[in-house]
Image (cartoon, grey):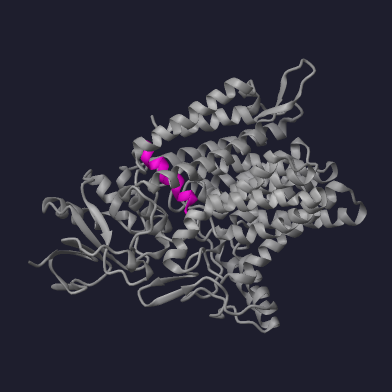
Amino acid sequence: MMLLLPVVFLLLTWAILARSRETTPNGDAKSDWGEGLLAATVIAGLAVVASTEGLSAFRSLGRIPLAIFWSIAAAVALAAGWKVGFARPILHAFALPTSFGWFEKASAVLMILLAAALGVVALLAIPNTYDSLSYHLARVAHWEQNRSIAFYPTSILRQNHPPPFAEWCLLQTRLLSGSYQWVNLVQWAAMAVSLVGVALVASKFGAETRGQWAAAIFAATLPMGIFQATSTQNDYVAGLWLIAFVFFGLQAIERPTLRRLILMFGALALGLLTKGTIYLFAFPFCVWFAIALVRRMGRSVWRAVAIAAALVLLVNGGHYLRNYRLFGSPLGPGSETSDNDVYIYRNEAVGLRPLLSNAVRNLTLHLSAPWPAWNQAVYRAAAGIHRAIGADPDDPRTTWLHEKYRVAFRYDENFGGNFLHTVLFAAAAGVFLYACARRKNTEVQRTLIYAICLAGAALLFCLLLRWQPWHGRLHLPLFLAAAPVFGRIASGPAVWKWLGRPAVALMLLAAFPTAALHRARPIVGGNSVFLGPKHEKIVRNFPLDVFLPALQFIGENRCRHVGLLLYGDAPEFSIWLAQEVIGDWSVRFEHVGVRNASRALAPPVYPPHILSVGYAPERVLILDGKRYALIYSEGAVNGYRAEP
């Protein structure tokens, strides 16, 4: 299967980069499989960018050209490995440490079982997160149809301007496999590599093997991570790049070799191409690393600056240019338009009071629980804090349009929180502050600076972005970055007995019910991913049956070019999935009646047929002077044919 080609490339690159320049007493090269995996993932990510941008430039972004690219890449990796040698044996990468006792071994096995169970769910579940239907996967479908990642006219503006790397991975998975069945594995794979990454970061703080596993378990059992690991969202991918950037950054400030600088800034560039929040989350770490590199490298620091600028521009330049041409800014419009509403991302009010308000409201997203009485108590406490500081929890200047502050919990990636992990991290932070007051060494100081950067990233997020009730999913990279700190603190000899071990047990015990009760992709119950035809599991938020009759009607009337008239947040990908269920891929879909900036990209000729979703039927529909007659109407879906 062609999907294995990039996997083979990754494995070969992993085996090459895992080789260490150090040797064993027998003269064999040592292997660092954890660092090698993280480095190989960065290289593979850069290869995804090169292949996507390169093939798109010639409108050749299809299955065969991609297969050729990855075949050549795998051959080059094989030749390089043949010349410099591979690290071996690979089974050492998966062996449990011999120093582990029964509890540590049991915990590690349970974590691996949890990850495996999530992998099975990711493979069986059809993508059905609303954001995925609205833009994550809808943009993938348009790119596949257009054989290009060029911007296109769309009523759902988020299909164009957000950073696209995670969706490029979805696109390549779709093209190489020929199915959407595998696309959830992108986030799952990001989770798996992230667990290695947080363990590596914990090791830089002096955490021994037990502490590194505790950090990995903290990350693996995050409820928001569990919810997202089986979805086609992009926060786990973004979190992976943040962790990789931090790890290679910590290495670079110790000894700034060319390899470490390339991997450090390569991971940063990929993070910026994945999620806009990485600009905020990475900024405090960039300041720390910049100061440290200046001290370490002196005047030659310009080399690091050149590498950073080159990688960020090479990786993000294409997307920056597309955004600039359409919106006049490399980062996009800064707002969303849906019908007559304009949704602005940034806070209109900036200051101490809005900062405190957003900090409290974002924190309470992770203090929510499945108990309404508890959530009401948290809400009242937060409202009391707002009264004390003279702030409005529903201030429209710092709150997403049409939303009101509330504390709610749901077993999904929209309204799930990390309650247990928030409490445990707060307890560990208290222990750490006490330890800082008693002793100071290099590892403690480094952990303290890291924790300050982590807090700075959270505050920067609260300072600049409007509060949204689904912000909890955007916090996932921050919680992943917090895992190494928890692992370092909780694994101390004295702390492990009364905090570390109970915390690990609690997190693992809570993780399995969390995975089983996922609202959109449950393991148990009547809606289990193991039950029912796959197409019935596609969209529980927006039933697929709404679109199947319309597409069958289109097929019967031999409509091959259809315009989509959609509202600004429609679950468009449902239409493409319905088309896959029917098995007719000869229809070309394009947005019509677009009323945002992407209207400038519309072709001069309208399609002969229109599929309208979410609007009342009209006997005659007029779009830019062209008249269409109503020929089909069922619920919120209407079909039109151009009048002669």
Image-based side of 461 in relation to 202, left or right: left
Residue 376 vs residue 493, the one in the foreground: 493
Q: Tally the numbered discs.
A: 0
Residue 156 at x, y = what percent? 37, 64
Q: Is the magenta region chiefly helix, strand or loop?
A: helix
Please give the name of the residue rendered at 61% of the width and 56% of the height, measured from the top-left corner.
418
- Magenta stretch encompasses residue 630: no
The residue most toward the right is: 438
Please give the name of the residue rendered at 64% of the width and 51% of the height, measured from the top-left corner.
308
Q: Which of the 4 quarters of the picture holds residue 159?
A: bottom left
Residue 217 at x, y = what percent? 65, 43
Residue 270 at x, y = what percent? 56, 49
Residue 196 vs residue 411, the one in the foreground: 196
User: Is the residue 113 above or below the residue 468 in the image?
Assistant: above
The N terminus is located in which quarter?
Answer: top left
Stretch of the chain drawn in magenta: 164-177
Query: Looking at the image, can residue 157 be seen?
Result: yes
Residue 566 at x, y = what percent? 29, 66
Q: Which of the 4 quarters of the picture holds residue 504?
A: top right
Please give the name of the residue rendered at 57% of the width and 79% of the height, measured from the top-left corner.
348
- Magenta stretch encompasses residue 175: yes
